[in-house]
Image (cartoon, helix red, strand yellow):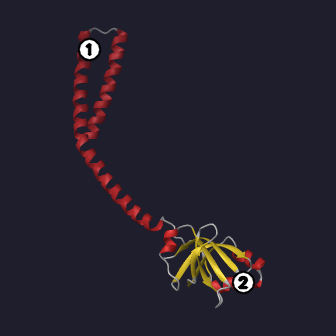
Amino acid sequence: MGMFLFTIGLLGGIGFLIASIVFAIKKVPKKKQWGATIGVIICAVLFISGTVMTQPSEPAQAAEQSKSSSAQNNQTSAKNEVSSEPSITDGATKVDYKTLYKDYEDNAISADKKYRDKKLILTGTIANIDRDIGQSPYITFNVDQYGVQNIKMSFDNDDVVAGLKKGQKVTVVGTCGGTFASTIVVMNNCSIVK
């Protein structure tokens, strides 16, 4: 109802402006403009009452819409918090580390086509924890009992490696870098899967 009065008042106000312009152009005497003045007063009353009647309900509706919108956004945010952050294992292939080493030992060229620059997930027991020549932390999984053949996994973060211990079983995800000196298979940019 308030919106109806508001609209009628607005249209009446526009009508008055048009009538005033027409009267001014035709030079109608002021005595004959009383009807237009009364029409303006009625339109103004309708316009003001329409404005007053629509204001309380519209903010209430806006607040209600805002609440429901916020609730939907919170639910969406909660869903996105769970699903929007990609897992470190997304797009990674699980491979037995001994199989990975054997494939490189048998034919490094074929193994490169299969594994190099691909994200792999390896699970094994830590044989060694140290730093390489560039001071990057790494761990190894031994393939043989002597520690000559191993998988070397390099990390970007000291804190991750500092919390590990020799003999601990871990799952690592990283990018395969191929072989080094035909006795080590290298994994780069590694992370521990929790």
Instruction: Please identify the quarter of the rendering in which residue 104 is found.
Output: bottom right
Q: Pick the quarter of the image with the N terminus.
A: top left
Instruction: Please identify the quarter of the rendering in which residue 97 is found.
Output: bottom right
User: Which percent across, then down, holds residue 103?
Assistant: 72, 83
- The numbered mark at residue 160 is none
Which residue is tagged 2? 103
Instruction: Please identify the quarter of the rendering in which residue 71 is found.
Output: bottom left
Which residue is tagged 1? 33
State whether residue 18 is above or below residue 119: above
State whether residue 72 is above or below residue 162: above
Q: Is residue 149 left or right of residue 128?
A: right
Regarding mark 2 in the picture, which secondary structure is present there? helix
Mark 2 vs 1: CB contact within 8 A? no
Regarding mark 1 in the picture, which secondary structure is present there? helix
Q: Residue at x 24, y 27 (%)?
A: 44
Amino acid type assigned to the residue bearing label 2 in the image: Asp
Q: Residue at x 28, y 8 (%)?
A: 29
Label located before the other in sequence (2 or 1): 1
User: Which of labels 2 and 1 is toward the front?
Assistant: 2
**Which of 41/68 is in front?**
68
**Which of 89/35 is in front?**
89
Report the Cα–Cα distance between label 2 and label 1. Answer: 101 Å
